[in-house]
Image (spheres, rainbow, N blue to C red):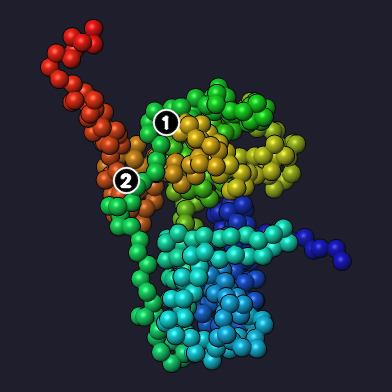
Amino acid sequence: MEEKKRKLLNRTDKPDNVVERENEILEKCGKIEEELPSWLRGYFMYLRSNVLPMTRLAYLQDIRFFCEYLLKETELAPGITKIKDLKPEHFNGIKAVDINIYIDWCRRYTVDTAEGTVIYENRNSSLSRKKSSVSVFFKYLYRDGFVEKNITDGFDPIRLPKPGEREIKALQDDEVMKMLDSVTTGSGLTKKEQDFWEKTKQRDKLILLLLVTYGLRLSELQQLNVSSFNFDRGEFKIYRKRGKESIMPINRTITEAFSDYVNLERPSDDTLDEENKDALLLSLRGTRLTDRQIRQIVKKYTSVSLGTSRDKGYSPHKLRATAATSLIARGNSIYDVQELLDHDNVTTTQLYAAHKLNTKRELIKNFEWDEDMKKPGDEQDDK
């Protein structure tokens, strides 16, 4: 049967690609909801009303994973083989200790696939999110009378670093310059990478500059269109979380990088499919770059600047941190930086303010033990 074509009737001010992306997330949520028991309809409504779409998707994925664990790894739902067939009484029989065992199991587990066995290891931050998802779920079950007790108070705490303990990973200014030199000249790239670089250097440079200048989130960068930019007004528009619009000023560096990419490298519109004609960042196949492709590009050039392997390169989010720390180090107000980066709470921005660039390096630079150990007259011996 021929698949029916979908048509978007967009009556909002948002570009079609932004609406399409939001719709993709909502469709993923809908598919997971179809796998879960239908009596959880109230829980689905609760998530729709109270959390962002991406958070809603993460919660649903976590609950589906928890249900799969119940069926495959425990005897808490005997005789049940499908998630859809789970009943309220199966959850009513779960105790806090069972959840604590589940969270501990999540630290390291294996999954058998057609290609072989995959080993998963989770950090405490990932475990904390899984615990949060299950906590919200069981609070809902208790609130709506599906379970007799609120067992969430018995969940073991997961120790996470305090804000002051967390090491913020960001490029220093000299590393940013090395990264930009690499994308400008091709230095530090392998022969195969240089072959691609010859065709994509202007695009890649624009990507890196947008990230380290504005601290854009990956989704904000990926969804940019050519029409997002208004050079007559010296600004471009991005769409934040919750569908919020934000206007960003354009500086000379971005103007030049944009012009070089669009005029020298980006395919002309008449060679592109209709859905990709307005997309700013294109692959060599003429399609909008995916999140994964952008991550790989950023990892490649940051690994050159850090002098490490490609898999140890930084993510786009760490270039967001780079923008924050660099702006604050230049004396800008944390409240202005908060506005630029769209932090919900200034406390988040303060974490970057507390991260003083080069502090450790400067402390150690003049703390050489071999210099302190020299005795009077040693200078003469060195001659």
Secondary structure, mark 1, is helix
Residue farthest right in this picture: 1
Look at 53% across and 37% down and name the residue there. 309
Q: Residue furthest left?
A: 376
Residue 283 visible, this orientation? yes
Residue drawn at the location 67% of the way across and 82% of the way down = 81
Question: On the image, numbered disc 1 is attached to which residue?
Answer: 175
Tell which circle, 1 or 2, labels the residue nearer the N-terminal end. Answer: 1
Q: Is residue 10 visible?
A: no
In the drawing, does residue 214 fall left or right of residue 37?
left
Which one is nearer the viewer's eye here, 119 or 143? 119
The residue lying at 44 percent from left, 49 percent from top is 246
Q: Quadrant of the C terminus?
A: top left
Q: Nearer the viewer, residue 334 or 256?
A: 334
Asked whether the residues under the numbered discs 1 and 2 touch, taking CB atoms below 8 Å apart as contact, a structural biologist would say no
Identity of the amino acid at label 1?
Glu
- Looking at the picture, does residue 66 appear above or below residue 229? below
Callout 1 crowding tier (Cα within 10 Å): few <14, some 14–19, many ≥20 = some
In the rendered picture of this protein, how many numbered marks are placed on residues?
2
Image location of residue 181, percent across then percent down: 49, 24
Viewer-nearest residue: 106 or 59: 106
Establish if 87 lies above or below 213.
below
Q: x, y (%) of residue 52?
A: 48, 65
> In terms of secondary structure, where does tag 2 sit?
helix
Identify residue for label 2.
352
Identify which amino acid the numbered label 2 is placed on: Tyr
- Residue 117 quadrant: bottom right
Q: Nearer the viewer, mark 1 or mark 2?
A: 1
Residue 150: where, in percent of width, then height?
Answer: 39, 86
> Residue 74 location in percent, x, y?
56, 81
Cα–Cα span, label 1 and label 2: 17 Å
